[in-house]
Image (cartoon, rainbow, N blue to C red):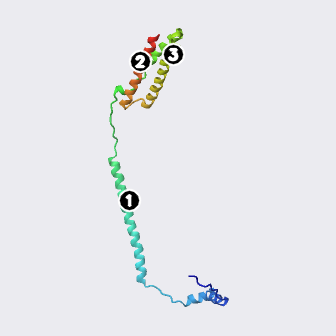
């Protein structure tokens, strides 16, 4: 439902402005009654403020005591502890790779007798050996100096056995 629009006359607006005129407004304010609360009311307000501060102070003091006690307890029980672990010698990587020595000997022979080393079967074994060497190096890097996982040692042993077999096959062809 729409109400009809109505615009008040200028006379009405002028009377409203006169009521809220600053000087008129000040005179109206002076005519308002003034009350002063009793002294008892002010005392209750200040005691409430003081009680609130006191409650906060109690909480801060309690938190400080708990914090200090906690730090003291932690420092009292803090000590140096250590464990001694023994290292299984089978899990330590051997720095010497004996298969490399055998392969170096085969390379020396290939320099003197190139006919055997040019055969496709020999080249295939050489490529397979290179792949195994790459896999061995990657596995050794993953294991680190002190391996703690026996499964990786087993995998490395399998790769080394395969390398030895290929070197034997290469030596048999020469």
Q: Quadrant of residue 14?
A: bottom right
Q: Which mark is residue 64?
A: 1
Mark 3 → mark 2, Cα distance in angstroms:
18 Å
Q: Position of residue 136 (x, y in %)?
A: 44, 25
Q: Position of residue 61 (x, y in %)?
A: 37, 62
Disc 1, SS: helix
Looking at this rendering, what residue extends furthest in the right direction? 10
User: Dot 3 corresponds to which residue?
Assistant: 120
Q: Nearer the viewer, residue 156 or 8?
A: 8
Please say whether residue 120 is visible from this viewpoint.
yes
Q: In percent of the image, x 45 and y 12: which residue is there?
A: 171
Q: Nearer the viewer, residue 98 or 47?
A: 98
The answer to whether the residue labelled 2 contacts the one labelled 1, judged by CB atoms less than 8 Å apart, is no
Q: Is residue 144 above or below residue 114?
A: below
Disc 3, SS: helix
Looking at this rendering, what residue extends furthest in the top direction? 112
Please say whether residue 98 is visible from this viewpoint.
no
Q: Which mark is residue 165?
A: 2
Which image quarter holds the N terminus? bottom right
Q: Position of residue 168 (x, y in %)?
A: 42, 14
Q: Is residue 12 above or below residue 128?
A: below
Q: Earlier in the sequence, mark 3 or mark 2?
A: 3
Mark 3 → mark 1, Cα distance in angstroms:
82 Å
Q: Nearer the viewer, residue 165 or 38?
A: 165
Q: Is residue 97 above or below residue 64?
A: above
């Amino acid at each position: 439902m729409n109400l009809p629009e109505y615009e008040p006359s200028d006379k009405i607006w002028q009377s409203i402005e006169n009521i809220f005129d600053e000087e008129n407004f000040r005179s109206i304010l002076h005519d308002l009654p003034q009350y002063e609360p009793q002294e008892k009311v002010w005392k209750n307000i200040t005691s409430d403020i003081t009680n609130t501060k006191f409650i906060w102070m109690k909480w801060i003091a309690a938190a400080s005591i708990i914090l200090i006690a906690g730090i003291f307890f932690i420092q009292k029980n803090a000590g140096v502890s250590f464990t001694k672990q023994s290292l299984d010698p089978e899990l330590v990587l051997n720095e010497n790779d004996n298969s490399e020595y055998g392969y170096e000997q085969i390379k020396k022979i290939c320099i003197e007798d190139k006919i055997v080393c040019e055969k496709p079967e020999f080249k295939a074994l050489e490529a397979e050996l290179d792949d195994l060497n790459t896999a061995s190096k990657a596995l050794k890097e993953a294991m680190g100096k002190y391996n703690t996982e026996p499964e990786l040692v087993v995998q490395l042993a399998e790769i080394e056995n395969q390398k030895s077999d290929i070197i034997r096959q290469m030596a048999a062809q020469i």
